Image (cartoon, rainbow, N blue to C red):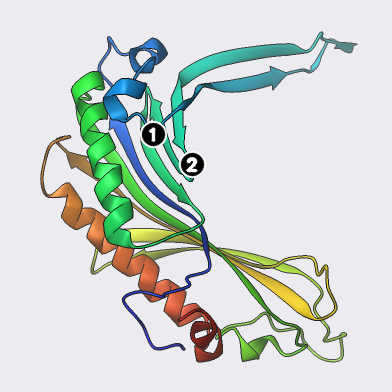
Amino acid sequence: MARAREHLQNAPIVEAVIDFRVVRDEHVSPETFAGLGPSIGKQYTQEDLIQSIHARFGVDHGKFQEPLQMQTDLGWRYQAGTEVAQYRVDGFTFSKIEQYETWEKVSEEAFRLWEIYVDVAKPRQVSRVAVRYINRMRLPATSDLSRYLEAPPRIPEPAPQAIREFLTRLVVNDEKRKVSAMVVLALEPQTSPDEISLFLDIDAFCEVKEQPKDPGLSAVFEQLRRLKNDIFFASITEEIVEKYA
């Protein structure tokens, strides 16, 4: 297990996400979030409608039914370079894509934009919050994954021991903090004989019943961040950390 650090100078984070889910006000619609660019900041120059597309097909009395496609508007997406804000009827999401700097910078911008969401949408309650960090670690190729992972997949003998790819998904509960996390760990397809790519996706979340402007929300997010950090450093070895420190 790697020694925990508060911050890695060259963290392998490809995306950091802060997410709020809400109980919506009945009067809120996707158009509520149209044209927010001037309010959220002139740097958010790219605006796109967020849509959900559902397709349905089937068989009725032995006859194929014509495919049915339904499109639903959910809100608006605003982007400023590597920062993305999603204003939706069911909540707000802020994403920071590479290059990641610090939690303080990401959370400060997320909460600034969240306050605008609250003023515009007037949600009745916050129902779920989450912190998700997606890491991609490019490392020298090895046949011994225990060099990098504290709990690599094990193949029973006498099966072949060379692992080309793998994917694991776990959901864990932290009873003390009263939060949970979904953890996805994968060895991606190898594109170079000299390098492997390990993918570690940690989504820490909890159900809440908080008022949108409750200052206690920041403490909940801090607990989620700490759980995310605990899982990250517990999953990898010191050799990886030294590479990105």
In the drawing, does residue 143 fall left or right of residue 150?
right
Mark earlier in primary sequence (1, 2): 1
Residue 11: image tag = none
Residue topped by disc 2: 81
Q: Quadrant of residue 197?
A: bottom right
Toward the front, the furthest residue is 42
In the drawing, does residue 206 fall left or right of residue 66?
left
Percent coordinates x, y for residue 77 in the rendering:
46, 28
Of residues 131 and 152, the one drawn nearer to the viewer in this rendering: 131
Q: Residues within 10 Å of mark 1 (few under 14, many from 20)?
A: few
Question: Which residue is found at the position 25% from the left and 20% from the top?
Answer: 121
Q: Amino acid at mark 1?
A: Gln
Compared with 83, 26 (above or below) is: above
Residue topped by disc 1: 43
Of residues 153 and 46, the one drawn nearer to the viewer in this rendering: 46
Callout 2: SS: loop
Q: Amino acid at mark 2?
A: Gly
Q: Is residue 172 visible?
A: yes
Q: Residues within 10 Å of mark 2 (few under 14, many from 20)?
A: few
Percent coordinates x, y for residue 212 in the rendering:
17, 34
In the drawing, does residue 157 fall left or right of residue 238?
right
Q: Are marks 1 and 2 in contact (CB under 8 Å)?
A: yes
